[in-house]
Each structure stands twice: as C-alpha cells, then as structure tokens.
Image: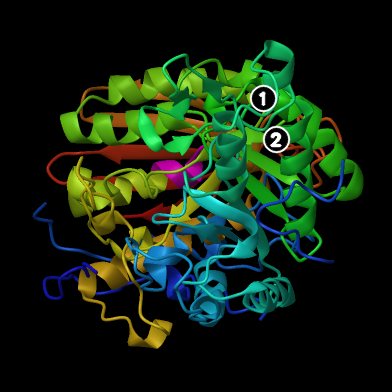
Amino acid sequence: MKNPSAGDDGGADYDGGANDGRGADDDGGMKAAANTMPRSAASSPAASSPAVSSSVVSSHAPMLPAASSRTIWWHVYPLGFTGAPIRSDDIAGRRTVHRLTRIIDWLDYLRDLGCDGLLLGPIFQSATHGYDTVDYYSIDSRLGDEDDFRALARACHAKGVALMLDGVFNHVGIDNPLFRKELSDVRAGAGSDGADAIGGRLFSIVAKPDGTVDYPVFEGHGDLPEINHDGAAAADLVGDVMDYWMDRGADAWRLDAAYAVPAGFWRRVLPGVRARHHDAWFLGEVIHGDYPTVVQESGMDSVTQYELWKAVWSSLQSGNFYELDWCLKRHNGFLDHFIPQTFISNHDVTRIASTVGFGSARLAAVILFTVGGVPSVYYGDEIAMTGIKEDRLGGDDAVRPEFPERPEDMAMGREAESMRDLYRALIRMRRDRPWLSSARTVPVEVDNRRYVYDVVGSADSDAGDDGRNPGYAGDGGRAGGENGESLRVTLALDPEPTATIRDAKGVVLSL
C-alpha cells in the first residue's frame, strides 16, 4: 500500500474557532447450489488544512433508512482492502478466511469522514479479481462466508450506513458451473442450436461444424463468457440473486458493465426487485453514451458520470478550465433527468493524486462536493493516496491496496491528515446543504487556469424522480433555492492550486 509521505505541512489551522469537521454527532433462505438455476422463476506543494467557517459546523442531515440520491458513499474494493490473494490457482481447494468483517472496524472511520454509504466491490465467489463470478450465492471464500456478510450488514445498519453490492451480471467467470454445464450440453449435442433454443439458455453457446464451440465474451476476454440477456433465464437469475442478498441486508446494487447489457433487460428485472424491496437503489456503470436515455430506458436510478470524471482531472492536469466548464453544462442537462453518481477515482482508474498531484487533487475534491450528484469517495483518496493503473497482469493492484485491520494502525503523514481534514469539511458542508445533490452550476468567470462558478439550488426539485427514491430532492421539500441558497466557488491553479467557497454570509471554506 502506498501511503502519503510525512513531512512538509503548514499545519491544521481552522478559522473562527471551528472544530476540525469531524462528525461529532455521528451515530455511532436456503442457498441455491452453484450449478442450478435460481429458485425463483507527482511532487506536491506544502500541504495545509482548509480554513473553515463556523457555518460548516452543525449537525448532519437526518439519516436516511436506505440508499438514496443524497447518500455519500465510501467505495471499497474488498479483496484488495482486506489483503486477500487476487490470483490463486485452486478455487475448490481454498480455505475460508474471514476477512470481510475487517471492514466493520472501519465503519466509524467512514462515519467520521461524513459518509453514510458503503459501496463494496465484488464479494461473491470468483476465480481471481472478483469480476469473474463463479457462484452468485456464495461469499468469496477469500473473504469469508454468509455469516460474515450478515454481520457486516447488521453493523452498517446499526451505524446508519447503507450497503451497496457490486453485481457483475453481464458476464461470468469461465469456471462458473452454470456456464460449464451449458458448454458441456452443447458439446454433447443436447438440444437444438436454433435461435429458439439459444434464446432459452443462460449463454449463447453455438456448436460449430468442426466440433468446436463459439460464444460471446466480454471485451475480448476469453475467460469472461457473456450472459444471454435476451431470454428469461438471465432475468430470473439476476432478479433472484438481487433478492437473495437484499433479504440478507444489501440496500443497493452497482450494476457492473451495465453499458454492455441491453437497457430493456434492466427494465424487465428491476421493477420486480423494487416490488419486493421498495427502497432498492440501482447504479449502472455507464462510460459513454446518452446517460439520460440509458436511465430512462433501463429504470436505473443513476449512472456513473465518467464524462465529469475525465473533465475534472484533464482540466486540472492541462490547465484548461474551459473543458470543465463545457462538461458542467452537460452535467446540468443530466440533472434535469436524474442525479448522476460522481467520483474522482475508482477501482478501475489511476488515482486522482497520481494524475494531477496533491495540490490539484484538493481542487478535484472541492469540485466533487460542490456540484450536483451522488458523490463517492474511493478509499484512500481522502488521505491523498497514490496509485497508477497499468495495462498488464496485476496492473490494477496499485489502485486496489490493502488497508490495515484498524484505522488507528494507518500510518499518515501531514499531507494525508490535511487531505482528510479537507474531505471532512467538504462533506460536512454538503450535509448542511442537502440541496447540493441536485444543484446546477453557473459559470461566472472562465479562464485556462482560473474558474469561478456559482452553485444554485434547483427549482425543479422533482426532476428525474418517480417517487421511488426517498432521498431525492423531492422527498418533502424543495431541492434548494427555498431561501435563495447558493455558493460561489473559485478555483485557481496559480501561483499554486487554491480554492475558496463562499455563501451569502461569507467564506465557508478556503484552501
């Protein structure tokens, strides 16, 4: 694990006698067999802590009982976080190691930061990195078992933390028994290879005249056969898996590679899950394309805002705030239809501190928490961790590090402490202004290396909500603007990265 270096720091100095932004008032069925179908049909400038006015220091907004568009997520990749071996040879010969419950000891850390959601990467039985699922109904033995999951879910809910699981429903691992059985059946000549027969299967495996078989795979990876989403078998399986884990404590689902799955598939599956779990919340991984149309046609609550992620780091890295300004105009348009999930790092990309350096990474955090969206903090970003993703076997390891068993064992230098103080202050500011989740941005001044924008509450508080999402701005009040709320954000790259946030009373935060 790469820890930020200790050393050069200007010290933590808050204005107005405010505290350090900590959440002082934070609160504290039968399993399906794996081979059966579902039961149901760079160098940094000197670090300094942000100066925060007393207006930031107040109680959190009331805790929500379930995931919503106002949840602030702490995103963890469990296999890496707990130090599990990623590339092991023998799945059947693995012994169960109870690592998943290590995360319980980090829930107070999550709450102290100000987050109220835990977004877990894959936790189901898989061959390697978690995205090659072998059994949807079993916890990966490298992480533990179902009892460990139940304990984690209970602990999350006791502390007011929503729990989101990562559902890899576009493809499976090549060792998945469901795939192996269909592959064996096709090779043995069982059934017809006609379109009707394939439509009834979980996979689109075709026998070729030369005796070999062919089937679609995910983005060229031969060990990741794709599920056939056209038939009922896939919809039954995915709906059943979602119900199974929501019955055991999950509140929400991240839908991995949702961009590769027909939107109509989600439209068939999600309503049934919502009927049984009324507060269910669904986030789709979508990289390119027409985000509002995807949300509308799929029935998902939100999608990943990769356009904004790219604009944030690229504008800071190249000194071109015009790019960010252009993207925020599109972001405003998205907010007319739904509230996007926003982030500046995740398990698939180089960390923001490695991409733009420590100083500009602080500006990226300011942007993340001052624009509309459902923000997520990728574990370690809040302490300025670095990590570069590489295009090679094991190239994700640097961005998916192990954390100590307990927060008190984390070695942190001055930069790490300074970044953590900034995240606390920004999250508290956002908690005090829940209208920010659907707020729009209005440019005031745009230059290559200086950007000023206003953040204003949305008058159309019900935009994009259909009544399912209790945390959307339409849950009993206006999204913002009720009392003319707004913020002015000033970002500058010269002579060093700085940011100031002001409201009608004066400076809210500066760094």
Left or right side of 364 for 442: right
The relative height of residue 218 versus residue 117 in the rendered view (above or below) is: above
Q: Which residue is mark 2?
A: 301
Q: Give the image location of residue 281, x and y in percent.
A: 73, 45
Which quadrant of the figure contains the N terminus? bottom left
- Looking at the image, can residue 459 be seen? no
Viewer-side residue, 502 vs 376:
376
Query: Dot 2: within a 10 Å radius of its alpha carbon, few (fewer than 14), some, or many (20 or more) residues?
Result: many
Secondary structure of the residue carrying numbered label 2: loop
Instruction: Check disc 2 and give the amino acid type.
Output: Asp
Query: In the image, what residue occupies the spot 82% across and 66% down?
Result: 30
Which quadrant of the figure contains the C terminus? bottom left
Left or right side of 489 for 116: right
Q: Is residue 255 magenta?
A: no
Q: Give the image location of residue 115, x and y in percent.
A: 56, 62
Instruction: Check disc 1 and give the amino acid type.
Output: Val
Give me the C-alpha separation between circle 2 and circle 1.
7 Å
- The quarter holding residue 188 reads top right
The relative height of residue 422 versus residue 499 in the rendered view (above or below) is: below
Q: Magenta span covers which residues?
A: 367-371
Query: Dot 1: within a 10 Å radius of its alpha carbon, few (fewer than 14), some, or many (20 or more) residues?
Result: many
Magenta stretch, main secondary structure class:
helix
Query: In the image, what residue occupies the spot 30% across and 52% down?
Result: 362
Q: Which residue is mark 1?
A: 295
Contact (Cβ within 8 Å) of mark 2 with mark 1: yes
Q: Is residue 369 magenta?
A: yes
